[in-house]
Amino acid sequence: MKARIAAIAALLACSLVVTAPALRAAHSERVDLSVTDANIRDVLTFLAQQARVNLVMTEAVRGKVTVYLEDVRVDHAMDVILRVGGFVSVTRRGILVVMTRQEQARFW
């Protein structure tokens, strides 16, 4: 499993908050992830797929992220990446919605 995750992470690297209850409840699946200057949307999508969590991101979720994580729970990885990027998440009807703090204050 780790080899598969590392291979997917390598592909992401080449092409390239707040932890919601849905993510915490979904899994304590552990991942290894190493990417440099990766699109944050790709990294968040990858983590959501590993946790089997439905994910929606607003258009404002943009940027690059460099991550090296080894044997980390998916929910912890997502939490740190969201916080570093200045993003937050809200769970609505089992869907993790990622947005900026400004969007959360305005719409949620």
Image (cartoon, helix red, strand yellow):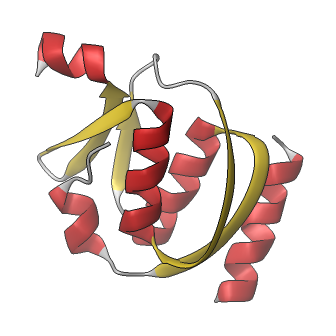
Which residue is located at x 80 percent, y 48 percent? 36
Residue placed most toward the observer, 1 or 40: 40
Q: In which quarter of the image is residue 26?
A: bottom left
Q: Where is residue 61 in the image (x, y as percent from the top left)?
A: 48, 25
Asked if residue 52 can be seen in this view, the reply is no
Where residue 68 appears, x then y in whole percent?
Answer: 69, 63
Left or right of 29, for residue 43: right
Q: Residue furthest top?
A: 106
| Residue shown at 35% from the left, 81% from the top | 28
Left or right: 82 as drawn, with respect to 102: right
Residue lying at the far front of the rendered structure:
84
Along the viewing direction, whichever of 94 and 106 lies nearer the viewer: 106
Q: Which quadrant of the figure contains the C terminus?
A: top left
* Residue 73: quadrant of the picture: bottom left
| In the depicted structure, whether residue 1 falls above or below residue 64 | below
Residue 60 position within the rendered picture, expressed as x and y whole percent measured from the top left: 46, 17
Q: Can residue 104 be seen in this view?
A: yes
Q: Where is residue 51 in the image (x, y as percent from the top left)?
A: 41, 69
Q: Which residue is at 15% across, 16% downward?
A: 105
Q: Image point 21% across, 53% down: which residue?
A: 20
The relative height of residue 59 versus residue 33 in the rendered view (above or below) is above
Q: How many labels, in total?
A: 0
In the displayed structure, 75 sits above or below 58; it is below
